[in-house]
Amino acid sequence: MFFFLFRALNPVLIAAAVVPALFLMMKIYRADRLEPEPKNILVRLVGMGFLATAIAMALETAGGHIAAWIARSETMYNIIFYFLVVALAEEWAKYFLLKRSTWNAPSFNCRFDGVVYAAFVSLGFALAENVGYVLQYGMGTALLRAVTAVPGHACFGIFMGAFYGAAKQYEHYNIEQSRTYRILALVVPTLLHGTYDYIATQDEGLSPLFILFVGLMFFAAYKVIKDLSRRDDYIRY
């Protein structure tokens, strides 16, 4: 208890937990070249990320018991738990709150806005999660998560936002296409998240496979940001 309170009052440790998420939020915000999003919406979306952690924790607790009941082997349990419990619960919670908060917002008038919104929810989630882990485990965890888990959540949000923005773009022209993109906005980050967690838990430490997967995902997310920012346009109604 003493060490937890010491960490909670340690400004260096708190900064190590918070700064990586804030840095990525700023980078993504600055990539929005057409029309910067209102600050009040972005702050609210970070708060939605905090709320998503609570929703996901409740779903994961229930889902973990179900996975243990269904699974007939350790491998089956890991697949069910990391893909259908952890990844789906966390990405669904983010997506649910993202859509409720922004789909009908007047400021959602460019495709790239979807990337900004989803990334801020996802990084709000990462921020809340990171503070908890860092206060519990210390500076070593802060440094490791700064280059893995926090950018990982940013990537999940970027891919979610790319499809979410496309869904909004097609809303008034092709309902079926818009629905397909909304499904992909949940499915793609869930698969990436599940793969990330599954690989990360198979070996102690940073395995070559994990490093390769994370590197490719980070590179792909960077390319998505650059491409969508460059080609961004206003949504036509």
Image (cartoon, grey):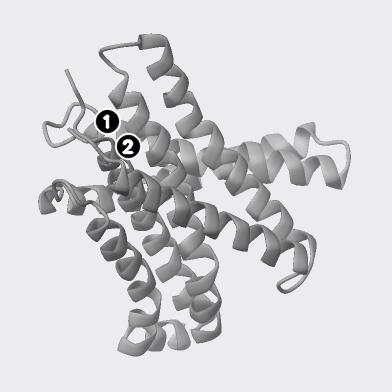
Instruction: Please state if 32 lies on the left or on the right of 6 as rendered.
Output: left
Instruction: Please state if 10 lies on the left or on the right of 150 as rendered.
Output: left
Instruction: Please state if 97 lies on the left or on the right of 217 as rendered.
Output: left
Which one is in front, 179 or 232?
232
Residue 235 in view here: yes
Q: Which residue is mark 2?
A: 97
Up/down of 102 relative to 176, above or below: below
Residue 61 in view here: no
Q: Are marks 1 and 2 in contact (CB under 8 Å)?
A: yes
Up/down of 199 relative to 7, above or below: above
Residue drawn where x is 37% and y is 63% of the image: 127
Residue drawn where x is 46% and y is 64% of the image: 150
Q: Which residue is mark 1?
A: 100
Alpha carbon distance from label 1 to label 2: 5 Å
Q: Position of residue 13 (x, y in %)?
A: 39, 85
Which one is in front, 143 or 84?
143
Count the labels in the image. 2
Residue drawn where x is 38% and y is 51% of the image: 225
Q: Circle 1: is it few (<14), some (14-19), or many (20+) Cα within 10 Å?
A: few
Q: Position of residue 89 (x, y in %)?
A: 52, 39
Q: Circle 2: is it few (<14), some (14-19), or many (20+) Cα within 10 Å?
A: some
Q: Position of residue 66 (x, y in %)?
A: 68, 34
Which one is in front, 64 or 26?
26
The amino acid marked with disc number 1 is: Arg
* Element type at mark 2: helix
The amino acid marked with disc number 2 is: Leu
